[in-house]
Image: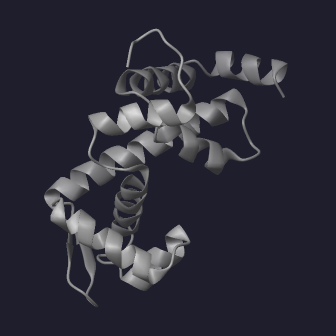
Amino acid sequence: MEKDRFYTVRGYQIHSQERKHLTSAMEDYIEMIYRESLKNPYIRVNLLSELLNVKAPSTTKMLQRLKELGFVEYEKYGVIGLTEKGKEMGKFLLDRHSTVEEFLKNLGVKEGLLEQTELIEHNISIETLEKMRKFNRFLEENPEIKEKYQKNNP
């Protein structure tokens, strides 16, 4: 893909997919398992399926793929755990989600916040993510600027 040419959203997604081996769905599973691991020592297929609003057989198939890639420890009908690789990825994915969500909140987005966060987080570059993180930090360190923006953009 050439740098300065326009493509459809799907075209950009395909190009992005060529650069990484995890799909958006895989990322969602790892992120959710990681989120849950911060509250409970383990998670089971039924709960994970419920949290992601998918059917249990789909969750089982995904867990098998994630196990093959070395992100999860899972035996059929057993508990699900993240490997060290999975924990590192989960931490990154949750941080990415939180950064995008905070950025959108700083812009004043309220309606559809979760949906917008999900759509953006899977298609954002590391460079853009880092700039969002720095911008969020800048607003946190300069609350008067954030207040001024919020007053002008209710």
Q: Is residue 33 above or below residue 16?
A: below
Closer to the camera, 57 or 34? 57
Write down the quadrant of residue 65 in the picture. bottom left
From this view, report whether residue 143 is shown above or below residue 100: above
Residue sitting at 17 percent across and 54 percent down? Answer: 85
Q: Quadrant of the C terminus?
A: top right
Task: Say which residue appears at 30% left-offset and 78% top-offset.
Answer: 42
Tell me residue 68's x, y (percent): 17, 65
- Residue 75, above or below 104: below
Q: Is residue 56 left or right of residue 103?
A: left
Observer-nearest residue: 51 or 8?
8
Seen in the image, is 79 located left or right of residue 125?
left
Q: Residue at image x 51%, y 68%? A: 52
- Residue 70: % across, % down: 15, 61
Q: Position of residue 47 (x, y in %)?
A: 45, 80
Q: Residue furthest bottom?
A: 77
Picture quarter with the N terminus:
top left
- The residue at 40%/12% (across/down) is 3
| Residue 16 shown left or right of residue 111 in the figure | left
